[in-house]
Amino acid sequence: MISKGNSTISTAGENLRLARSYAFECCEQWHLADLSPVCSLIYPFAYKLTRHTTKPFFPSARTLAGYFDRSESQIRRGLKELLELGFFELIRAGKFQTNTYRVLGHTEWAKIHPGQCASKETFPYTNDGDPLGQELWAETGGRIRFQQFQIDNLRNLQLEDTIIKERFAGFWKETGHTLKVQAVSPYFFKTLQDCAHGVQI
């Protein structure tokens, strides 16, 4: 059992999932993947009915079971898991009637449960990465993806970014576009290294 802010749901492999980085931003579906499959039916349905409002969600397990063609026990388990995870907040517990919940969106949930979201990978050639990497990537029309160590190596030549970009534009137009993808970065580095050492290119 692990603590998730105010929630206490135990999810298999969660710590391993949190330790990794992913190609996408975190969202509700990333968290729901650890729960019973029925939660992926209940949550978006509830959020659709109540989003952008304070409208409560007071489902009947029987009604939801009929709607989703699932058993009432499956539905009750899903509601319980969503409550424990914190995507549902209990407003009122009904003894002889249905419970009433408030449905939380991912943004609000993440503020209440810091450190529990998936981490998105960043690369020097994306909008989240190194500006020089983005410029070089764009110059190639998205063909060449420079890794951060490659960008660092270029900067270690003590040339201004503007010079590196100008030299790469000429290199790509004349030679780079004809090379194999994996050869572009080392070939350009050698070319730029000669430039930095005063060798005419």
Image (cartoon, rainbow, N blue to C red):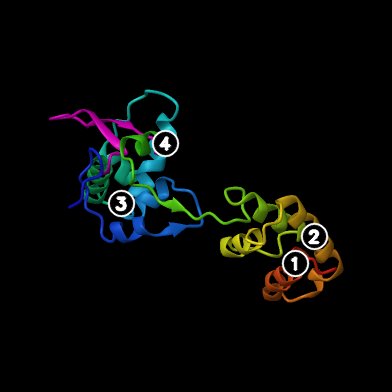
Name the residue carrying label 3: 70
Q: Bin the neighbour count of mark 4 within 10 Å (Cα to Cα): few under 14, some 14-19, many 20 and up.
A: few
Amino acid on which the number 3 mark rests in the picture: Arg
Would you call the spot at circle 3 few (<14 residues within 10 Å), some (14-19), or many (20 or more)?
A: some
Q: Which residue is mark 1?
A: 197
Q: Quadrant of residue 187?
A: bottom right
Q: How far apart are the alpha carbons under marks 4 and 2? A: 43 Å
Question: Are discs 3 and 4 less than 8 Å apart at CB?
Answer: no
> What is the crowding at mark 2: few (fewer than 14 residues within 10 Å), some, or many (at least 20)?
some
- Is residue 131 placed above or below 142 in the rendered structure? above
Query: Quick one: SS at disc 3?
Result: loop
The kind of residue on which mark 2 rests is Arg
The label nearer to you, 1 versus 2, is 1
Foreground of the two, 58 or 44? 44
- Report x, y in % for residue 182: 67, 74
Q: Is residue 87 magenta?
A: yes
Percent position (x, y) of residue 141?
75, 59
For the residue labelled by badge 1, is the local secondary structure a helix, a strand or a loop?
A: loop
Q: Are marks 4 and 1 in contact (CB under 8 Å)?
A: no
Span of residues in magenta: 85-107
Which residue of the protein is positioned furthest toward the top in this rendering? Answer: 54
Residue 167: image tag: 2
Amino acid type for the residue under numbered disc 4? Thr
Name the residue beneath numbered marker 4: 107
Q: Secondary structure at mark 2?
A: helix
